[in-house]
Image (tube, rainbow, N blue to C red):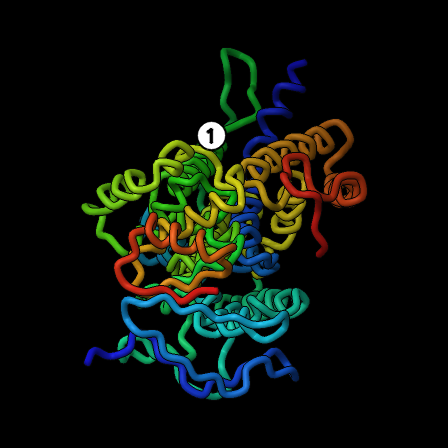
Amino acid sequence: MTDPALTITGVVAGYGGVLALRGVSLTVQPGTITAVLGANGAGKTTLLATISGFVRPREGRISLDGTDLTRRRPEEIARAGLAHVPEGQGVITELTVEENLRLGALWRHGRASRAEALTDAFHRFPLLAAARGRSAGTLSGGERQISALAIANQGIVLNLGRVVAAADAAELAADVGLRQHYLGF
Amino acid sequence: MREFVQFTLGGISFGMVYAAIALSLVLIWRGTRILNYSQGAMAMLTTYIALTVINHTGSYWAGFAAALAAGLALGALAERTVIRPVENKPPLNAVVVTIGMLVFLEGLAGIIYGGQYRSFPAAFSITGLHAGSLALGISLNDCFVAGAVLLAALGLAVLFRYTPAGLRLRATAFNAYAARLLGVRVGRVLTLGWALAGLIGALAGVLVSPATFLYPASMDSIFVLGFTAAVIGGLDSPAGAVAGGLILGVALNYVGGYLGSNLVPIFGLAALILVLMVRPSGLFATHAGRRV
């Protein structure tokens, strides 16, 4: 029996005096897709923000393959393999598409393998190859989402801000060639 | 006409010093949205360190290098210790902290070195240069000042455009949230930004101190004019900082030359007020404006 990839136990989190999450527990198994569904204001975005490190949980534990990620900085959590692609936020619009990819590749690869990683990304996403020199701000929302996915897809777990429809999600997953698992909604 | 040429060339040297301070301020502003009121005081302290090294070793360049190294260290130290806690707080907190640093550093310098005016050596000759029989109004040292700041600005531009560290700096300045998502260690990047600002500020200090003499408050007016230059150029724009410095330096030299040197501080302040009233985002800014 392999360990679950992402484990969230008893997480309590909120903003100031308002608690959005009161003891949320969740396990994402390897090789699966988990969707979190809820009404507006139910706490979905807060949950993702807490997992990614932008909101500090007051109680509870978040761990990835046994590594404790609770209360770590967002960039450290990203480097541990938990990529977060929030809606409309995954890329830096003032930089070019290529610069965004290069930025994402900086910590993953030594200087030698960076160029190769970039070529690989452009190969899998011809859309990005075509736009590589353009400012990321010129991409449409969906294209930005794909860019962010391309950057993040080497992560072990992908935390998506929003997926429009189930059919799209399956296509997206197939496109990205995710080998492991992602948590999204 | 001859006077005009002399005043124009003569204004470039000080203008480049204002540009250097403006560049430091822009670096920090872009990265952390903080205006570092102690930038001049930090430059003053590193110049004192340079003077100590020069007096001990007899070598100007050893002192020069020591000032630059001290600038890097001081900038990094300031960010890690007193600035980090106020980076995500209301802007007023950072204002109070940087002014506090200004007071602290000037007091510290007074305690260690005393308040008397000290002379600081120039790197090269300060006698006026001539083109044939025409006095140009600048010296070899002035050329060095302009060249050094220009080189520093170009070095920064290369760093920003072509290196991974520069990519991280730009990413963090544009969108720290997205940078974190991409795995950028934003804290370390900000420390680097402050260190570089400290370096450029230290350069400004050693370049201008031969003319102003060195004492705890010697960088105060230079800071104000550097800040003015940054505002003229637009606080977001490094190119604007350099342009703003040159414009201000030359303009003030015209004032000093044609109208009298005691009017220069007034005109400097007037320039600041004018820009803030008419075009607060500066001549070269890309965004609408900001509050301070």
The residue shown at (69%, 34%) is B252
Q: Residue furthest front?
A: A167
| Farthest top residue in view | B132
Q: Residue sitting at 44 percent across and 68 percent down? A: A35
Local packing at callout 1 (Cα closer than 10 Å; few below 14, some 14-19, many 20+) is: some
Q: Position of residue B89 (x, y in %)?
A: 61, 70
Residue B110 image-quadrant placement? bottom right
Number of marks drawn: 1
Residue B87 lies, in percent from the top left, at 55, 66
Q: Is residue B291 left or right of residue B234?
A: right
List x then y, in percent, for residue A163.
48, 57
Can residue A152 be seen in this snapshot? Answer: yes
* Near-viewer residue (B153 or A20): A20
In this view, B165 is above or below A179: above
Q: Left or right: where does residue A88 sit relative to residue B71?
A: right
Is the residue A24 above or below the residue B262 in the image?
Answer: below
**Looking at the figure, which quarter contains the N terminus of chain B?**
top right
Quadrant of the drawing holding the C terminus of chain B: bottom right
- Tell me what residue is drawn at x 50 percent, y 87 percent: A23
Depth order, front residue of B107/B83: B83
x%, y% of residue A55?
A: 51, 74
User: Which element carries disc 1, helix, strand or loop?
Assistant: helix
- Residue to which mark 1 is pinned: B143
Chain of the residue displaying label 1: B
Q: Quadrant of residue A80?
A: bottom left
Q: Which amino acid is tagged 1? A: Cys
Q: Residue at x 80, y 39 (%)?
A: B278
Q: Is residue B202 above or below residue B163?
A: below
Q: From this view, report whether residue B173 is shown above or below residue A95.
A: below
Query: Would residue B126 be seen by someone viewing this image from the given angle?
Result: no
